[in-house]
Image: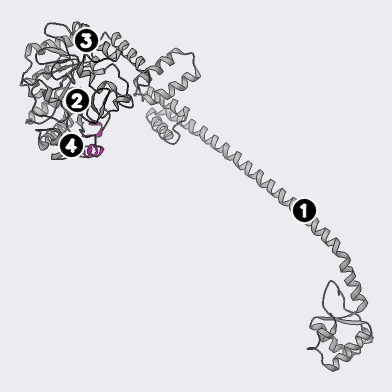
Amino acid sequence: MGYGGGLGAVAGLAKRSILGGLARCGYLVVKKDPETHPHRANYGAEIAPAKRLILDALERRGYLIVKRRDRDAAQEAVASRAPEEAAAIRAERGTAAAQRAAEEAAVRRVVEEATARRAAEEAEKRAADELRAAEELAATPANAEASLRAQLEIEPGRIDLLQRLYSVLEEQAKPIPLGLQDQVLTIQLEEFPDRPDLRDRLERVHYKRRKLSRERMNEITLADFREGGEVPGNLYLQITNDCNLRCAMCAHKTATKDHSFMDDALFQRCLDQAAEHKIGSVVFAAAYGEALLHPKAMQYLKESVARGFQVILSMNGNYFLPTDQIRELATLGLDLLQYSFFGFDKASYEKTYVGGKFEKASENLRLLKAALVANGATTRLSVNGVNITNDPDRTLKTREYLRTLGIQDSEMRLLAPCNFGGQISPGVRSEKIHGKSFKPIDRLPLYVCPLLLSTPGVLTDGRMTACGCVDNNGSLTIGDIRTQSIAQIRSGERFQSMINAFVEGDLSKFPLCAKCDIPYGNLHGEYNEPSA
């Protein structure tokens, strides 16, 4: 800029005359700018020493004395460099973009390498886990089982883990869950489709899980029955039709209850027939009647155990049980003791066990469990309870109460009620059976009834019923054990016609069976009633 605009505060009028002289000599006073004024003018002898003091002061304030032609030349040089600088800027930007692209490519390579490294580490870890599992399997099968189950909690569908667990359970001679058998055999059959043994084993698993068609289910059931010589697994004995209760889940209203008792001769006949037909289990239970009310009940139990039968006793515990009798029951050598109990207080218990006493039944159960433990008995205890309303909360409270009596969860079997051959009315109505049930009967297939094949019962007068569990008045009588053998009775026309009726799906000639919900199984295909 010229001197006129920027020196008023620096120089007075006297000084301005000096600057005016410089201007006439071709000099300019300008603000310092390294681009256009790289060097100050060499004014040398043209400026007297005295005047230089003023010029030096100007320089200290940021001004220079330059020749006009030098200033003009510097400005022209700057202007000529502008295109070159723009090109340089563009080149610099291109270089920066290329550098960024290179950096991004490098980052991608790092990510890809890290991903590959992670996959390799995971594969290595899995291999190490498999090796560790194999080592555990070779060392301690029990530890291997626990480890495999823990891994399956995290990865439930891993085929290799399922197969190893199957092998571990086999090695320990432990029961293999049907679901696990189903998974492993399916995998093996896919790998070896031409192996009939695998196909047969898988079908048997599907049979047990009720995954086959109704027709195929019945075919296998009856084939097994015939192959086993049509021998039932149990013989139910009604040694009395007397009972001290009128339970809500029992069809006591239709039962024959003439307070009769099986005599010694008939009882011995029953044991002889069971032994002759190789029936392993004798069950002191019936559709109606409390076995321990028979005056010779303990004697009959002892005799049955002594003859080598697996003996099952059902009881309700609502009577006086002396300490010595409780101890005797605990040490008798029974296979299974079924104690009927459901409820968690006086009101809930006595609503189910009408005529029963909550306190007495509870105390007898507590003492019996304690006696079994104290004597190291091998007798299994099963507390069987029926939740007449199928209310889960009542089941939960009953479980909690039973624990206070020393009963383990594994000893509890708390169920919704069956409809007792249509003689009681729990649940909702079904058109298929013209009665009520807690099962969705109208959506379930009718199978050959398992009770029909496995639970014949002898009544107090010697008549044999096809169903010792539900027939409380002899309506399903198929013979008389006093004059016929079990084989003759079971091969007779009456019993065989009942089997055919189930196969054909026409139970009209057997009203008790036609209205019963037991042969239908629950939604999961099981025969037993669903847990409450």
Label 1 – label 3 distance at C-alpha: 99 Å
Closer-to-camera residue (81/325):
81
The percent coordinates of residue 303 (x first, y second) are: 12, 16
Give the mark nearest the N terminus, 1 or 3.
1
* Circles 1, 2 touching at the beta carbon (< 8 Å): no
Count the marks. Answer: 4
Q: Mark 2 or mark 3: which is in front?
A: 3
The percent coordinates of residue 383 (x first, y second) are: 19, 30
Segment tinted magenta in the rendering: 389-417
**Disc 3 marks which amino acid?**
Phe
The percent coordinates of residue 177 (x first, y second) are: 36, 25
**Disc 1 marks which amino acid?**
Thr
- Which numbered dot is residue 95? 1
Mark 1 burial class by Cα count in 10 Å: few <14, some 14-19, many 20+:
few
Mark 2 burial class by Cα count in 10 Å: few <14, some 14-19, many 20+:
some
Image quadrant where residue 528 sits: top left
Residue pictured at 50% horizontal, 19% vertical:
191
